[in-house]
Image: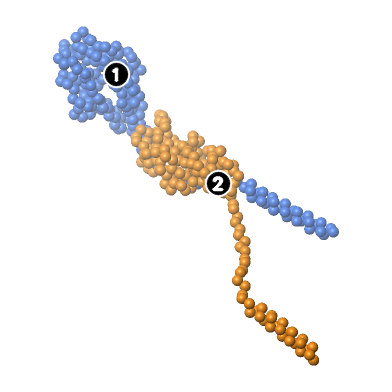
Amino acid sequence: MSCNFKFGGMKALLAMGGLLCLLASNATAQTSSGQLTITMSVQSSITLVFQNNPSVGTTGFCPLTNAGTNNVGLDFGTAAFPGSFHTLACVNYQHIGAAVYQVSSAFDVVVSKSNSSSPNYRLAAQISTPPPANVSWLLDNVTLTTAGFTTLDTADNYATPITKTLQVQVKNSVPAQPLLETITFLATAN
Amino acid sequence: MLKKYISIMRGAALAALLMCGASLPAQTTASGVINGSLNNTSGIAIQFDSDPAGVTLGAAGTNAATANFGTVSAFGPLAAGVTRPSVTATNFTVRTIFDVQVTSGGLTSTSYTLTANLAAATPSGMSYKVDAITLTTALQTIQVNGSYNTDIAHNLDLVILTAAPGAGGPAVNTPITTTINFTATAN
């Protein structure tokens, strides 16, 4: 009798052990793993944007359209030689000599660099189409041409606003007409 | 004597009947059984898929895929499927999107947890994020309730310092390779 009881107890223990094993097996978390390998190469780069000068709105500092980008607009409004006529208060208007008037406005150029050890940059500009006779486009008193880029600065600092003044000089003999020009700026890392 | 003769004849007749039965046609049917068995186990599997908005993965559809960002820079052009969500004075981020699909079988689990870690320390000037979670060599939880059997898109961001090489920034014009380990665990 005692032997039978012991044998029955052993069977129960074995059954329970098996059950526990099954439970333990089911409790194991199911996992799966994978690998994603990334490749890339970093390249040095610089960028140029035009910004409104902090004095924007005052005389000589007209607002840019689309400021903060590398493709902006600068409108001088309407002007004429007689009577120092000009329609925008932000335009700096003046007569130069006896027969030429000039409108001008300043803005900022900011060039930033990334992943580069270049200490500074060169800045140049050119106009896209030849202006009518007796009309000149200038930056900081440097006349621009379509022949090539004209150097404006040789060592400007990155991430620093550089104020540039765009001028248009028109002789009083120039017929009334819209004067449109696209000025391309080129910054080159030194 | 006659009784003995009759008895012999009966025995001979019975033997003839038995022999006759033995010569009947052979049995034409047979039967058998196959005891089939299958151990249907449970499991899950992870794979990486290309996302329509991201770069095309190498070895897509497997658990060992590659993502090539190509040449990246703060201001220059980027490869198809790579975007640049931010540029600051100190760093810029380039991003692609990839899909993770986890399939399951034999489980009552209805979702999974996705974790990831870098296989090695980050290269100089770089950090890696999956869904805005910065990765390290230790496991980070990316998602706690992923659904099985469907592609789930994840952002993979590379945050790159703008500093020059040698000044904290990454090496330039040099291929940089990093491996991210992903693990899906059934909830």
Residue A175 or residue A158, whichever sits in front: A175
Provide the residue designation for mark 2.
B104
Q: Who's the residue at 37% across and 33% down the image?
A: B74
Q: Nearer the viewer, residue A137 or A23?
A: A23
Badge 2 sits on which subunit?
Answer: B
Give the percent coordinates (x, y) of residue B155: 46, 37
Residue B24 image position (x, y, % from top left): 63, 77
2 or 1: mark nearer the eye: 2
Q: Provide the chain ID for the residue under circle 1.
A: A
Q: Residues within 10 Å of mark 2 (few under 14, many from 20)?
A: many
Residue A3's x, y, as percent?
82, 59
The chain drawn in blue is A
- For residue B95, above or below residue A154: below
- Disc 1 secondary structure class: strand
- Residue B163 seen anywhere in this rendered image of the structure: no
The image quarter in which residue B3 lies: bottom right
The C terminus of chain B: image quadrant = top right
Please identify which colour was used for chain B in the image. orange
Question: Label 2, label 1: how many angstroms apart (C-alpha)?
Answer: 66 Å
Report which residue position mark 1 lands on: A106
Amino acid type, callout 1: Ala
Assign a secondary structure to mark 2. Answer: strand
